Image (cartoon, rainbow, N blue to C red):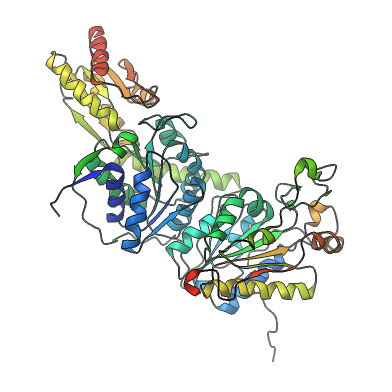
Amino acid sequence: MEKVVFKKPHALTDVPFHYCAGCTHGIIHRLVAEVIDELGCEGHTVGVSPVGCAVMNYDYFNCDMIEAPHGRAPAVATGIKRAHPENVVFTYQGDGDLAAIGTAETVHAATRGENITVIFVNNTIYGMTGGQMAPTSLPGQVTQTTPYGRDVNKAGFPVRMCEMLSTLDGVALAQRTSVDTVKNVNDTKKAIRKAFQNQIDGKGFSIIEVLSTCPTNWGMNPIESLEWLRENMIPYYPLGVYKDEKKGARLENE
Amino acid sequence: MEDKFLMKGNEALAEAAIQAGCRHFFGYPITPQTELAAYMAKRMPQVDGTYLQAESEIAAANMVLGAAGSGVRAMTSSSSPGISLKTEAISYMAACDIPALIVNVQRGGPGLGGIQPSQADYWQATRATGHGDFQILVYAPATIQEMVDLVGVAFDKGDQYRIPAMILADGMLGQMMEPVKLPEAKANKIIDKPWACCGHHNKRPHNILNSLLLSPKELEDLIVQRYKRYDIIKENEQKWDEYLIDDADIVVVAYGASSRISHTAVDMAREKGIKAGLLRPITLWPFPVKAFETLKETAKAFISCEMSMGQMVDDVKLAVECKKPVSFVGRTGGKIPTPNEVLDKIIEVGGCC
C-alpha cells in the first residue's frame, strides 16, 4: 500500500512557477503555502501580490489574491483587513517594492500596528526589470545601474528594514531569515508561521525578511549564489529576531 | 424623514455616503475638503465603520482599492493636488473593475494652485484619472441637495457597472451651507459581489483581482469588452438639467457652481428680451450629448461657462457637432465669474446671431 509522504501544499495552485533556475522565491512560496495549510486558513486568507518578480504569485496561491500597484501592498492589505478583520491578510513583496517605492506604505502600516503579515524577499536587486540597483544592494555591488559597483557616496547606503522597523511601537514581530541551508529554510518556515499566528492572535504588524538569491541577475550559478548570500549578505544583514512583542504591539492586548 | 438640516456641503456629502452604506473611508487632509474627512472621523466610529487617516493620498486611494476589492463600499476624498496622487490607484481600480467612490472638492491648479473654488480638473476627471484606456463615472452636483442625492447614485451605478465613480464638486459646494433632506438609510442593501476578494471559504475557486496581462491580445480583448460596457453606460446614464431651453437662441452650458451663476445670468438676459437658456450637465462622463440632439438644430449659439480656462468647450463642440458656434466665458485660479460677466457674453454672442 502506497503512502503519501510528501506533496504540494493545497494553498499552492497547479500553475507552474515562472521563476529562474536557482531562484529562492519558489522555496518561500512553498513555505507560505505550507503555513496556510497548517493553520487551515486558506478559505479566509487574502494575499496581496507586489510588482516585481513575484507579481504573478496571484496565480500560484490558492487563496483570494489582489495585485497591488508597485509598493502599495501594505496599503491595499490595510484596506482589506479593515473591511474584513476576520480574514488573514498577507503581502509578499520584494526589496524594490517594499524598501524603495513602498517605504512610506511599509513604515506607516507598521507604525499603525496594522494586523497584517508581510513577507519581504530581499535579494539585493531588481530582478524583473533585469538587475538594477535595489535599496538593499550592497556597497560595491555591481548591477545594471551601478556598473562600477554601488558607490555609497553617490548612490547611498543600503537600507536595513528589520532594524529600522524594530524601532516602531506598532511592530509585533520583525525577523530576518534566509533560505540558503536546510536549517535556515526550516527556521524561515517557523518565522513565517509565527508571523501568521501573530495576526490570528491580533498581535499587530509582523514582518519576515527572507534573504534570497537572484542567480540570473547576479551572474552566478545557483550554488555560487547561495555562497555569495552567505559571504556577503548575511554579514550586512544579520539573521535574527529584531523585535518580538510577546503580548503583541496593539494596545488592547497589553 | 421629512426634516431638513442646514448642512455644510462637505459634511452633507459625508453623511450621505454613510446613509448609502459606506463604512470605510480612507483620507488625507487637504483644503477645501477638510470637513468631509473630519465628519467621517466623528461619524464612522458611531456606525462601526472605518475612518483611517492615511500617510498620503496615494496610500489612502490604495486602501480604498483593497477595501473595495474585498467587496465593501469604500471611498476617499481629496482636492485637486491630492487627486493627482490618487490617479495611480484609480487606474488600477478601473483595470480590475473595482467600484469605489472618489470625491474631488476642486481647488485652483495647476501645481499647489490655490484653495479657492475651481473647475480646472474637468479634463483630469473626464479624460485621464490615470494612465491607460479607461473612464470613470463623473457626477457634477450643483446644489448640496443634489450632491447628497448623487452620492447614493454614484455608489449604486459604480456597483452595477463595476466602475469607479467620482463626485466632482468644488470648494464653493464643499464650503457653503444649504438646507438638505438626507436620504433614507439603505440598511446596507448592497448587491452581491461574487468577484470580491474576501476569502473563498472553500466554496469556490480563488478570486484574483489583477491588471497585469502580458499578452497583448488578452489585454486588448479585455479593454474592448470594458468599452462595450462604457457604451451601455453612455446609452443609459447621461444626466442633465434644462432651464428655459425650449425657445432658447443662446444656450449657456454650465455645471456645478458655475451653473448657478449662469442660471442668474439667463434670468437677467430674459429680462432684457434675449432668449437665453441653461443646459446643465449632471454627468460629465458620460457627457450628456443626448441633451443637444434637438438643441443643436434649434439654438443659434452655445456658451460654455466654467471656472477654468474652458476645458468643457471641446465636449460642447462635439455634442453640437460644430453645427453652431461655441464660445467660452469663465474665470480660473479660484476666481468665480459674476452673473454680469456671463450676461455680457450672452449679449455679445446674441448680437452676432
Which x, y percent locates residue B69? 45, 57
Q: Nearer the viewer, residue B195 or A84?
A: A84
The image quadrant that residue A82 belongs to is bottom left
| Residue pictured at 85% horizontal, 42% vertical | A148
Which quarter of the image is occupied by the N terminus of chain A?
bottom right
Tell me if residue B136 comes above or below residue A41 in the rendering. Answer: above
Q: Nearer the viewer, residue B240 or B331?
A: B331
Tell me if residue B78 comes above or below residue A254 in the rendering. Answer: above
| Residue pictured at 81% horizontal, 43% vertical | A151
Whether residue A139 is visible, yes or no, is yes
| Residue pictured at 46% horizontal, 40% vertical | B82
Tell me if residue B324 comes above or below residue A122 in the rendering. Answer: above
| Residue pictured at 59% horizontal, 56% vertical | A107
Left or right of A61, for residue B167: left
Whether residue B202 is visible, yes or no, is no
Q: Nearer the viewer, residue B99 or A6?
A: B99
